[in-house]
């Protein structure tokens, strides 16, 4: 596709556009041609001309609330933020040694991780096309490092297949691709695709399949040097007398098909997982801290909102101290941006329209569970040569993610030892923190037998027990019917947060929804 | 000091690591999409207790999970059935997680435990099915 019959290649066309019309036109042309497919981030806001003494109240100091606070304050508005917790960031959250976390039901965990180790209970990866979050990281000096999604040396595991033994990703991926390529090559060779491909294309397809599938000269996927160059050798390539490698035995297609291992072969190909993706150095809440450094002075912490009401040209929010002490306070403003999750907002006294109330009340929040387990040493690196990346399993823990930081260091390290959704997450949610760790150990040790010998400590977050969200992220029951109505100004309030986006559960969705709300609010105010 | 003692106690309990859970989970975690527990008490322990808590006492945070103890809202059988199947506000719909028999079992369990004595008008799989 780099050539077209008109004699203008795509690259030379872009060069022409860039030279003639400048960068903006070039970017627009690139988007049209499919080179750049951004989230709907439109670049940094530069709002001007806020009328004097216009007060904006923001409910919630998560990323959506702090984005709105930052942009509106910069535009010249008087901004005040109410936050239930004693810290900012919301679900952009990190647990470290020395932290205490009390979940609903009063179960308290005192996190005992070693210095530098952590668990990100919420977001843990930032895709490279989440431009808004990445731009704020850059502006606020939040240092990012690569997050390793795909590791060919990590495992695919099915307790019912391969005698329950974990298989290396590179072996399963190479075998599956090789067998499929061989089958397709056979069809082409037997002229089974004559209706679909020309003779000339068929020849090229065969050459492509040979390379793609690591086939031999006979277009077969077999045990040999071609397949072992991708799936690994039985005896590794080396130096000296013992240097000659011996090929590894391939698995049959049937063995792979009759396992569940093929299911996660494309996990890293998903748009949001494609390399390169990122994580903040030191924990996800470094992003929260970056925002907090900008707008922390605008935030009132430990404020539990109890009532939202509109009177004339004003919006009021009543709140009490989270610990129940003191009397009710009232904040009054000209407009409000409400980022309170609908799971919580549905229980707050409010006077939103019947339509908005209906949408708020109809949004359940997903169940998700994460456990971090700290081990005395990096046995996955030292014994199994796994450096970052993710192993997938059919066991209730669903996956194990290896820390993509401080590799090769001595001393304890934390694995993300479980991250299930759905029925498995609901059941972890119903267990005490101690019992959850016992179950995670039981399952994880089936993949890494070192688990019990090397165990140091564990921590977990079950999202339906998180006191300030009552669940992980908002699930639309009928997004087609309800979404736009939820974005509408209701009284003098606009909703924002990951739930008001088509990137649910992602920080980018929260930030983009806030940027959109801020722009619309500013337009409403300045054009009034 | 009290916090420190609690901290040490919890750290020890997780470090010493009982290799078994404090409650029987042998019928749990059998399917990624549905609950496989069949009796009301086990279904309650496996999903409901996550929010309404093991003794039905509920919980309070920025929002709350209502207590099921001595709860007169459970008098009408249809109300808890509808909530379990369809959800409302912070209560997620569990109709996909539980089949008709399971919904009936767990509704009958909560209506006759935690200080509730609504043994009449029991939920049945047929009734649950008619309300889906």
Image (spheres, coloured by chain):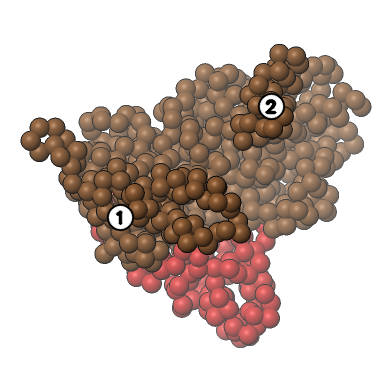
The x and y percentages for residue A380 are 26, 42
Q: Nearer the viewer, residue A154 or B27?
A: A154
Q: Disc 2: which chain? A: A
Q: Position of residue B119 (x, y in %)?
A: 57, 84
Number of residues whose C-alpha sits closer than 10 Å to that of mark 2, classed few (under 14), some (14–19) or many (20 or more): few
- Can residue B21 be seen here? The reply is no
C-alpha distance separating marks 1 and 2 = 43 Å
Residue at screen point 35% across, 31% down: A405
Q: Is residue A485 above or below residue A142?
A: below
Residue B95 visible in the picture = yes
Residue A496 drawn at (x, y percent): 70, 39
Q: Relative to the observer, which residue lies in front, B1 or A153?
A: A153
Residue in view at x 63 percent, y 70 percent: B85
- Mark 1 and mark 2 lie on one chain; the one further toward the N terminus is 2
Q: Is residue A335 left or right of residue A59?
A: right
Q: Which residue is mark 1?
A: A222
User: Judging from the image, what is the letter of the chain drawn in brown?
Assistant: A
What residue did someone put label 2 on? A7
Image coordinates for residue A400, horizontal then vertical, percent: 37, 48
Q: Secondary structure at mark 1?
A: loop
In which quadrant of the rendered view does residue A281 lie?
top left
Q: Which chain is red?
A: B
Which residue is at 67% across, 75% downward?
B132
Q: Residue A235 vs residue B118: left or right?
A: left
Residue drawn at (26%, 45%) of the image: A225
Could you say which disc has been placed on residue B23 in the image? Answer: none
Closer to the camera, A520 or A236? A236
């Amino acid at each position: 596709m780099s050539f077209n019959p008109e004699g203008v290649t795509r690259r030379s066309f872009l060069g022409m556009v860039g030279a003639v019309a400048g960068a903006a036109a070039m970017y627009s042309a690139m988007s049209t041609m499919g080179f750049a497919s951004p989230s709907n981030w439109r670049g940094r806001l530069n709002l001007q001309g806020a009328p004097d003494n216009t007060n904006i109240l923001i409910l919630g100091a998560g990323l959506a609330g702090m984005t709105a606070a930052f942009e509106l304050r910069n535009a010249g508005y008087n901004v005040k933020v109410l936050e239930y917790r004693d810290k900012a960031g919301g679900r952009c959250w990190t647990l470290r040694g020395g932290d205490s976390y009390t979940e609903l039901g009063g179960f308290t965990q005192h996190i005992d991780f070693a210095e530098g180790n952590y668990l990100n209970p919420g977001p843990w990866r930032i895709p490279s096309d989440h431009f808004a979050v990445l731009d704020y990281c850059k502006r606020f000096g939040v240092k990012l490092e690569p997050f390793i999604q795909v590791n060919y040396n990590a495992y695919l595991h099915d307790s019912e297949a391969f005698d329950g033994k974990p298989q290396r990703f590179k072996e399963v991926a190479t075998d599956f691709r090789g067998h499929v390529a061989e089958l397709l090559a056979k069809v082409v060779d037997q002229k089974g695709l004559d209706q679909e491909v020309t003779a000339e294309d068929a020849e090229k397809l065969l050459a492509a399949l040979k390379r793609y599938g690591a086939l031999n000269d006979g277009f077969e996927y077999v045990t040999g040097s071609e397949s072992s160059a991708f799936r690994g050798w039985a005896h590794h390539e080396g130096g000296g007398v013992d240097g000659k490698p011996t090929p590894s035995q391939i698995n049959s297609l049937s063995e792979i098909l009759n396992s569940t291992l093929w299911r996660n072969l494309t996990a890293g190909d998903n748009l949001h997982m494609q390399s390169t993706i990122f994580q903040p150095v030191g924990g996800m809440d470094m992003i929260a801290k970056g925002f907090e450094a900008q707008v922390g002075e605008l935030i009132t912490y430990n404020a539990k909102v109890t009532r939202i009401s509109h009177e004339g040209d004003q919006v009021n929010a009543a709140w009490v101290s989270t610990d129940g002490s003191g009397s009710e306070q009232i904040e009054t403003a000209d407009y409000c941006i409400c980022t309170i999750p609908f799971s919580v907002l549905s229980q707050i006294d409010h006077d939103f329209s019947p339509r908005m109330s209906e949408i708020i009340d109809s949004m359940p929040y997903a169940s998700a569970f994460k456990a971090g387990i700290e081990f005395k040493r990096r046995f996955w690196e030292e014994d199994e040569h796994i450096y970052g990346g993710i192993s997938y399993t059919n066991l209730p823990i669903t996956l194990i993610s290896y820390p993509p930081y401080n590799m090769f260091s001595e001393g304890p390290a934390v694995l993300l030892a479980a991250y299930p959704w759905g029925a498995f997450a609901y059941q972890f949610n119903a267990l005490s923190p101690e019992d959850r760790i016992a179950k995670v150990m039981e399952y994880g040790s089936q993949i890494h037998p070192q688990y019990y010998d090397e165990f140091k400590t564990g921590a977990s977050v079950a999202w339906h027990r998180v006191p300030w969200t009552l669940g992980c992220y908002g699930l639309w029951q009928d997004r087609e019917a309800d979404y736009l109505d939820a974005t509408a100004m209701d009284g003098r309030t606009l909703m924002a947060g990951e739930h008001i986006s088509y990137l649910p559960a992602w920080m980018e969705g929260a930030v983009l929804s806030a940027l959109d709300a801020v722009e619309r609010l500013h337009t409403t105010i300045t054009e009034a | 000091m009290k916090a420190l003692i609690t901290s040490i106690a919890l750290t020890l309990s997780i470090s010493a690591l009982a290799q078994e859970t404090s409650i029987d989970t042998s019928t749990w975690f059998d399917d990624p999409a549905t609950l496989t527990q069949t009796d009301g008490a086990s279904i309650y322990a496996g999903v409901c207790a996550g929010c309404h808590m093991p003794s039905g006492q509920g919980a309070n945070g920025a929002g709350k999970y209502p207590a099921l103890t001595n709860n007169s809202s459970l008098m009408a059988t249809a109300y808890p059935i509808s909530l379990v199947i369809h959800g409302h506000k912070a209560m997620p719909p569990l109709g996909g997680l539980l089949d008709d028999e399971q919904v009936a079992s767990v509704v009958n369990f909560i209506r006759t435990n935690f200080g509730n004595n609504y043994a009449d008008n029991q939920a049945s799989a047929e009734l649950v099915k008619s309300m889906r």
